[in-house]
Image (tube, rainbow, N blue to C red):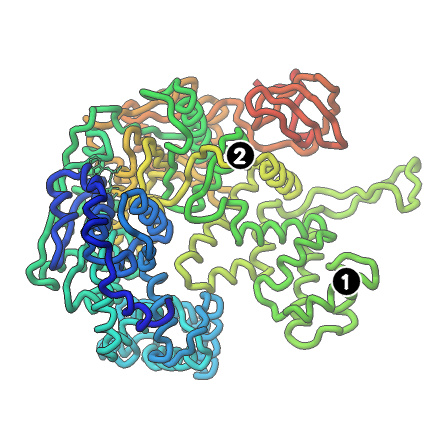
Amino acid sequence: MSSFDEMDAFEGASLSARAMAALPKDHLKWLNEPQLEAATKFDGPLLVLAGAGTGKTRTLISRIAEILHTGRARSDQILAVTFTNRAAKEMKERVQTYPVNVSRGLQWMGTFHAICVKLLRRHSELAGLKPNFTILDTDDQLRLLKQLLHLSNIDEKRWPPRMLAGHIDDWKNRALTPDKVPAAETSTFNNKGIELYAQYQIRLRELNAVDFGDLLLHMVTIFQTHQDVLEQYQRWFRYILVDEYQDTNVAQYLWLRLLAGAHKNICCVGDDDQSIYGWRGAEVGNILRFEKDFPGAYVVRLEQNYRSTPHILAAASNVIRGNENRLGKELWTDAQEGEKVRLIGHWDGEEEARWIGEEIDAMQGGTRGARPFNLDEIAILVRASHQMRAFEDRFLTIGLPYKVIGGPRFYERMEIRDAMAYFRLVVSPGDDLAFERIVNTPKRGLGDKAQQTIQMTAREHGVSLVDGARIVVDNGLIKGKGGKALRELIDGLARWNAMTRGPRIEVDDDSVIDDGTAPMRFGEPEVSHIELAQIVLDESGYTAHWQNEKTPEAPGRLENLKELVNQLDNFENLQGFLEHVSLVMDNEQEGDGAKVSIMTLHAAKGLEFPAVFLPGWEDGLFPSQRSMDESGLKGLEEERRLAYVGITRAEEVCTISFAANRRVFGQWQNSMPSRFIDELPEDHVEVLTPPGLYGGGQPAAGIENRAAEANVYNSPGWKRMQARQGQYGMSQPRESRNTVIDATAVASFTLGERVFHQKFGYGAVVGIEGDKVEVDFEKAGTKKVVSRFLSAKDDIPF
Ligand code: ATP
Ligand code: MG
């Protein structure tokens, strides 16, 4: 439907009374008393303020069904705001299972942004835009700001564009157009912030473009300045419903208030204890102020939790009690007692991933827990997305199906693929696909035309793209900035490639005839492959590319890159690492079978799982150091709410873990268990010591040495861990744990031979193909592996 007139033509057309009476009313059947009240109390503002798992979302869905059932509005006259597109999809599906009329579609059910794009396309001219406006990505946004800084002769080193972008974002979240920014903020960005913001908005209009924040800002402005437009929508959206209201920002709040201003049929559900988007401008104050803003608002509180066992609920409640700024609510459940929350400490992150993998295996097989669990009943919720890598690697290795929710899998992430493309080129300069991927990433001014020149030159000379590019540069075929940048890139690639080897060793051996076919010999490289990887990322400008980016995702991408570099420590050289990745990716199962979910705590909001793992509860990681540094106590309280969100996702089993060490840039760093662990109530927690590991006592001798080397024993984290031993379980690494793969040990195998693989365990050789060996592993099934990753049975390091 493209215009309002069309929409108005359908006003009043609803189901006949008879048709309605024929529908069974079972959309209300499963509600408890206060839920029923919230689902059926119409006319006027309503707030459902309640803790996790009390059925807020369920009540909201039932309310929509009731509106449709009673013919109060048609499905396209209901405005329902959800937090993610995924939540919107789920809600639509659930409403459709009720026998109510949704024939006109729940078109206005979605996120604030999705709904505002739709509205703004209709009214773009009121914002000085054409209907086909483009939505800028952050790259474009930064480029635009850079241009503006340049025009104003502002030194972008001292005043970086991403800092300005941050201020602009903040103003937009607060619904402030440039003319409305308070005088007190005049000094922002060296007194030029507001002026630059104004110029930026003008430039966007000239480009017929908007940024993300504009979607709401423009709609709020249009509603504020065009009463007629606002009134149309106030009439049209007869009922407004908002889930996760605690995470709305000021602009979203104003937009809702404007739309609900006439009939005030607005129902918001939320939980102040689950406000976790303060860092994006969410104002938990919105929910606390609801009754003031909507006088006469009816407030329903739900206290019965239907999701979790009493132990899980008690643990969550105790943690959140540590926050000062909250309304405070008590939750109860009549669910069966179930298992206590489980807590376990590990030596390091890899050990944590290994243990969780084994646990999941056992749970699936029914040997752990009260019943067998299906993989899709299990979730791993992490604080930072770089934590996912260890789990993904482990699960790929043992063949445990998993999916990453709310983002791609680790090795599929954009920044990881980019970095890997650089590494591939460093190792094999003839890798044209890798070259194509990175030639203009980061942007080097080498657009389509320049790339065609390289392609054609390479084809003409029958050489690789890198060699083609060298010819292009030598003959000055690409002029200007692009040509210069291309020279830098190929010089860099040659330099990095040389760094993979040591100096050439002259072979003083008469038996070798130097006819050009004798293999060259090289000494040890002067820099480690880990350092080299970092050099490549830095010198190519790739690290800086993300450092200059101000999007909320950019810090996460930088962390992922760090994690990638960390991971190299497990391998002898870059080549071995690249082979590992291509092999694990190759072993990946496809299909729609059940999978373990891995996601961030933020992405898990509103969801629930029978079994939840919460790894990485270490100070600095969770609560996140960044969040505490940037926002102090406020930041810490938001982290604690995140812990509450995490624990309350669990229905039956909740397992919290931490590691004493994590590797950062190949260096051991020790960490203290999260302060949130101290806040778990003893009576509801069981401390685990993993069986078969060196739990309880001192670490094994070899380990002790390594720990001493890393000075772990002197760290407060270790001392605290020791003090707690017996209180908290603590796993130690196996003595045989030796993750450095010896790439020089080339072995020859015969068919049928029993072999051992570091990651896949025992198996029998079933095929040999060059340096790849196909092995039927006892646990992991048949896989192709590189022969040097295998040991013959006799060499097994046990
Ligand atoms: P969150 O704060 O995490 O978003 P919520 O308050 O929205 O939680 P829901 O997701 O709606 O809670 O409900 C939690 C679980 O409890 C769901 O599995 C839901 O089906 C179930 N549930 C809710 N109300 C009832 C009820 N009256 N009887 C039985 N089960 C219920
Ligand atoms: Mg919910």
Of residue 637 and residue 144, the one placed in the foreground of this image is 144
N-term-proximal mark, 1 vs 2 = 2
Question: In terms of secondary structure, where does tag 1 sit?
Answer: helix
Of residue 659 and residue 483, the one placed in the foreground of this image is 483
Q: Which residue is mark 1?
A: 468
Q: In which quadrant will I find the N terminus?
A: bottom left
Of residue 263 and residue 394, the one placed in the foreground of this image is 263
Q: In which quadrant will I find the C terminus?
A: top right
- Residue 420 position in % (x across, y down): 60, 49
Is residue 133 something that shows in the picture?
A: yes
Circle 2: is it few (<14), some (14-19), or many (20+) Cα within 10 Å?
many
Instruction: Give the quadrant of residue 479.
Output: bottom right
- Residue 109 position in % (x across, y down): 31, 56
Dot label at residue 489? none
Q: Residue at x 31, y 52 (%)?
A: 102
Q: Residue at x 43, y 55 (%)?
A: 555
Instruction: Give the quadrant of residue 791.
Output: top right
Farthest-out residue, front: 18
Q: Amino acid at mark 1?
A: Gly
Is residue 623 something that shows in the picture?
A: no
227 sits left or right of 607 in the view: left
Farthest-out residue, bottom: 152
Q: Which residue is mark 2?
A: 396
Circle 1: is it few (<14), some (14-19), or many (20+) Cα within 10 Å?
many
- Residue 452 position in % (x across, y down): 71, 67
Instruction: Give the quadrant of residue 698.
Output: top left
Residue 734 vertical placement versus 644 (above, below):
above
Q: Residue at x 72, y 53 (%)?
A: 429
Of residue 720 and residue 663, the one placed in the foreground of this image is 663
- Residue 277 position in % (x across, y down): 29, 55
Question: In terms of secondary structure, where does tag 2 sit?
Answer: helix
